[in-house]
Image (spheres, rainbow, N blue to C red):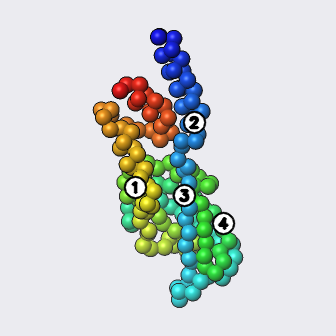
Amino acid sequence: MRKWLIGVLCLGLVLGLCAQAECSVPQMMNYQGKLTNASGMAVSDGNYSIQMSIYNAASGGTPLWQETQTIFISNGIFSLVLGSITPINLSFDKDYWIGTKVESDSEMTPRQQMVSNAYSFRAETAIYALTAGTGTQQFSVNKCDIDVFIHYIHQ
């Protein structure tokens, strides 16, 4: 019986470590927008340097995360992946705002508050379900398979 339990524990650890990369949440997010001039007209097509920053305040403060990308803008429309250069290592357990700065202009105001998408509400439910009844509030997305395995062993 003891060898069987040790074998199951080792198997769970190996599977958990192998699946860890699949379970990790990407430290990137898509961001799209339309860039216009002061008259409300789309900027000319071309490459633009855009600096994106994340703050924990609607105004003022120091960026918690920041990166600059050179992207092509067509008819004012742009799309970029935040975190593709500098991973976004924030907990996302509080309110955040995105600041945008194009070329040598000042950062645009007001900053845009980051909000949930529909699927993130489901993820919060899943985290609650995994920790319910365990007596702990700790949950690590990067170790979710191991946590789930331990959770079921202890029941």
Mark 2 lies on a secondary structure that is helix
Which image quadrant for residue 103? bottom right
Q: Earlier in the sequence, mark 1 or mark 3?
A: 3
Kind of residue at badge 4: Thr
Q: Earlier in the sequence, mark 4 or mark 2?
A: 2
**Residue at image location 63% in from the left, 63% down from the top:** 69
- Marking on residue 19: 2
Q: Nearer the viewer, residue 20 or 106?
A: 20
Q: Earlier in the sequence, mark 2 or mark 1?
A: 2
Kind of residue at badge 3: Met
Tell me the distance, in whole angstroms, between the alpha carbons under discs 2 and 1.
Answer: 23 Å
The residue at which mark 4 appears reads as 70
**Residue at image location 37% in from the left, 58% down from the top:** 95
Q: Earlier in the sequence, mark 4 or mark 1?
A: 4
Pair 2/3: label in front: 2
The residue at which mark 1 appears reads as 121
The residue at which mark 3 appears reads as 29
Pair 1/3: label in front: 1
Q: Earlier in the sequence, mark 3 or mark 4?
A: 3
Q: How dense is the environment of label 1, judged by Cα within 10 Å: few (below 14), some, or many (20 and up)?
A: few
Q: Earlier in the sequence, mark 2 or mark 3?
A: 2
The answer to whether 94 appears left or right of 45 in the picture is left
The answer to whether 51 appears left or right of 98 in the picture is right
Kind of residue at badge 2: Ala
72 in relation to 53, above or below: below
Tell me the distance, in whole angstroms, between the alpha carbons under discs 4 and 2.
Answer: 34 Å
